[in-house]
Image: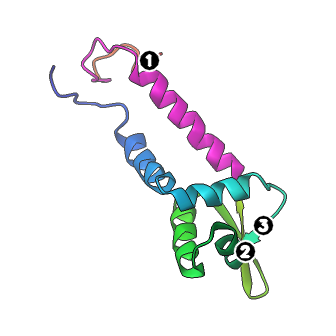
Amino acid sequence: MKKPQGFPWEGIGREMAEVFKALGDLNRMKIIKILASNPDESICVSELAEMIGITQSATSQHIKTLKNVGILAPRRIENRTYYAIDAEVLRGYQVQIDDMFKKAFVRCTHSGDCHDCPQKGKCN
């Protein structure tokens, strides 16, 4: 098989790699679960740290990682920052992941090179 010249996932692959890294930690998954299951509430770092059982410093680092991929929405009230899930961003990632998996199991007759493919990356 030749190396694809126009691999369709090049751009999305880089973005999703960062998302997968952000999701690839148990404590970050706990933060997502806590915030996603309480969509009408925002929670501050100290509360999250207590709920998860890690330090505030470690919680802050995890929050920074999740913010960097857009999953968390900060809201400042006086001297505290409260966080909530950005459900629209999280659902967008879910759609992209589902699409990637769907396309991953379709046999490509063009060696993964979308430039030569009549479907131009819109494979099913």
Disc 1 residue type? Cys
* Image location of residue 111, percent across then percent down: 24, 19
* Image location of residue 48, percent across then percent down: 68, 70
Disc 3 or disc 2, which is closer to the eye?
2
**Image point 17% across, 28% down: which residue?**
3
Is residue 121 among what the camera can see? no
**Mark number displayed over residue 47:** 2
Please name the residue that numbered disc 1 is placed on.
Answer: 123
Please name the residue that numbered disc 3 is placed on.
Answer: 42
Disc 3 residue type? Ser
Query: N-terminal of the two: label 1 or label 3?
Result: 3
Is residue 64 among what the camera can see? yes
Distance between the alpha carbons at the discs numbered 1 and 2: 45 Å
**Label 3 secondary element:** loop
Distance between the alpha carbons at the discs numbered 3 and 2: 10 Å
**Label 1 secondary element:** loop
**Image point 56% across, 60% down: which residue?**
28
